Image (tube, rainbow, N blue to C red):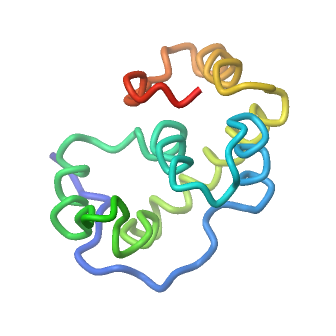
Amino acid sequence: MGISRILETPQPWTRMFESEFEEHLARITKLHKKSIRNGLYYWELVYNWMTPQERAKLDEVNPVLPNGRRRHKIHQMLDKETKKRLSSHLISVLVLMQSANTIAELRRLIQRRYGVDQPNLFDGWKLE
């Protein structure tokens, strides 16, 4: 499988998403920036690149609790190199978010930017 980007123990919390990212996400989803439902969009826009093996390891070392949250933030479980690469991806998504007025429009912009369909794990959730 190659080197896993998921760590066994969490790293200290640091801010991974700038407040501007959170504000634009709230604007285009029409959800409060602290809404737990925004986590689904973080998965779709940021963490979807993980392999099934990495998602399985993440679920093992940082399982979803009965309240639907995880004990640690996902980025606390990522190695340093992955966080560094993730930062440039976050900037790209932020630039596209600034141009979008809806989540559907953002998905189209991402598809056009990367030339592939942006996987959407949450179509069945009807969040729009």
In the visual, does 21 lie left or right of 68? right
Q: Residue at x 64, y 48 (%)?
A: 90
The percent position of residue 97, horizontal first and vertical second, equals 76, 35
Number of callouts: 0
- The quarter of the rendered structure image containing the C terminus is top right
Q: Residue furthest bottom?
A: 12
Q: Residue furthest right?
A: 99
Image vertical order of residue 126 relative to residue 24, above or below: above
Q: Nearer the viewer, residue 43 or 8?
A: 43
Q: Nearer the viewer, residue 33 or 75?
A: 33
Q: Residue at x 54, y 53 (%)?
A: 85
Q: Residue at x 70, y 18 (%)?
A: 105
Image vertical order of residue 10 relative to residue 87, above or below: below
Q: Nearer the viewer, residue 85 or 50?
A: 50
Q: Residue at x 71, y 47 (%)?
A: 91
In the visual, does 62 lie left or right of 71? left
Q: Nearer the viewer, residue 122 or 5?
A: 122
Image vertical order of residue 66 relative to residue 126, above or below: below
The percent position of residue 63, horizontal first and vertical second, equals 23, 65
The percent position of residue 71, horizontal first and vertical second, equals 34, 75
In the visual, does 59 lie left or right of 19? left
The percent position of residue 54, horizontal first and vertical second, equals 24, 51
